[in-house]
Amino acid sequence: MRLLEDKVVLITGASRGIGKAIAEECVKQGAKVAFTYLSSDEKALALVKELSVNGGIAKGFKSDASKFDDAQKLVDDVVAEFGTIDVLVNNAGITRDTLLMRMSEEQWDEVINTNLKSAFNLTKAVQRPMLKARSGSIINMSSVVGVSGNAGQTNYAASKAGLIGFSKSVAQELGSRNIRCNAIAPGFIETEMTDALDQKVVAEWRNAIPLKRGGTPQDVANLTVFLASDMSTYITGQTINVCGGMLM
């Protein structure tokens, strides 16, 4: 039996990179996947088609998770489509990197709203079906930057550190109802975004990691599936680094 057989998984920001890998692995493990996207209907339809190969079940929902009312409607729509939501993966995230002295209020607000407020919006909305079922797993995508900080990323680090505190608090509030909440903190994960970077710099980053390589979206997806599955029913309130030993 597959690890997520017949579970309904809602993933925000699944159109590429880590989010897409999570969606693919969830479908592979038997889940019915609902995912959000912001702009391209064409890309969303292509992802649905890709996920539906070999009988997979997936549907894209155009929604801005950083908007409270949109998040409420999204959850209502997913429940109407699939009957419930067993797993929520708050993966939507952006960067607006610059030194604090140059950072605008808009750059701060954009990152906090997309990375942190969206998790509040979706978690609040998804409580209803999970409380009704007295079961659920909420997984928040943080970052090693949220653990260690990083120059030029005060907005991003604050949002990702906020997700860690948020996850621990939600775990304490909802644990008695058998609803778990954990955070994943990826390190240097190689995606299409990193392909555009100076390869000499990328090589230096790899060399600084004990495992001497960058991570892959699949590395993060594997942990996400574990935390979503019944194999992790006694794990909650934790932050798990996927960083090749970058942080110890």
Image (cartoon, rainbow, N blue to C red):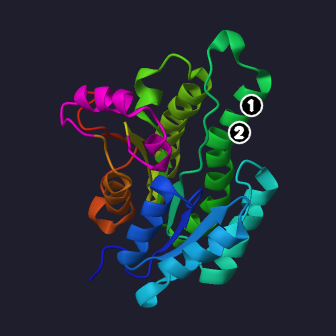
Q: Which mark is residue 113?
A: 2
Residue toward you, 37 or 223: 37
- The answer to which image quadrant residue 247 occupies is top left
The answer to whether one can see residue 132 in this image is no
Residue on which disc 1 sits: 109
Decide: few, some or many residues near mark 2? Use Cα within 10 Å; few <14, some 14-19, many ≥20. Answer: some
Residue segment shown in magenta: 189-213
**The disc labelled 1 sits on which kind of residue?**
Asp
Image quarter (top left, top right, bottom left or bottom right) of the N terminus = bottom left
**The disc labelled 2 sits on which kind of residue?**
Asn
Q: Is residue 78 above or below residue 238?
A: below
Q: Secondary structure at mark 2?
A: helix
The answer to whether one can see residue 125 in this image is yes
Q: Do residues under tags 1 and 2 come within 8 Å of each other at their CB atoms?
A: yes
Let me know if residue 211 is in the magenta part. Answer: yes
Let me know if residue 21 is in the magenta part. Answer: no
Residue 174 falls left or right of residue 217: right
Rounded to the nearest angstrom, the CA distance separating label 1 from label 2 is 6 Å
Residue toward you, 133 or 208: 208
Residue 23 falls left or right of residue 28: right
Decide: few, some or many residues near mark 1? Use Cα within 10 Å; few <14, some 14-19, many ≥20. Answer: some
Residue toward you, 202 or 126: 202
Q: Is residue 216 above or below residue 209?
A: below
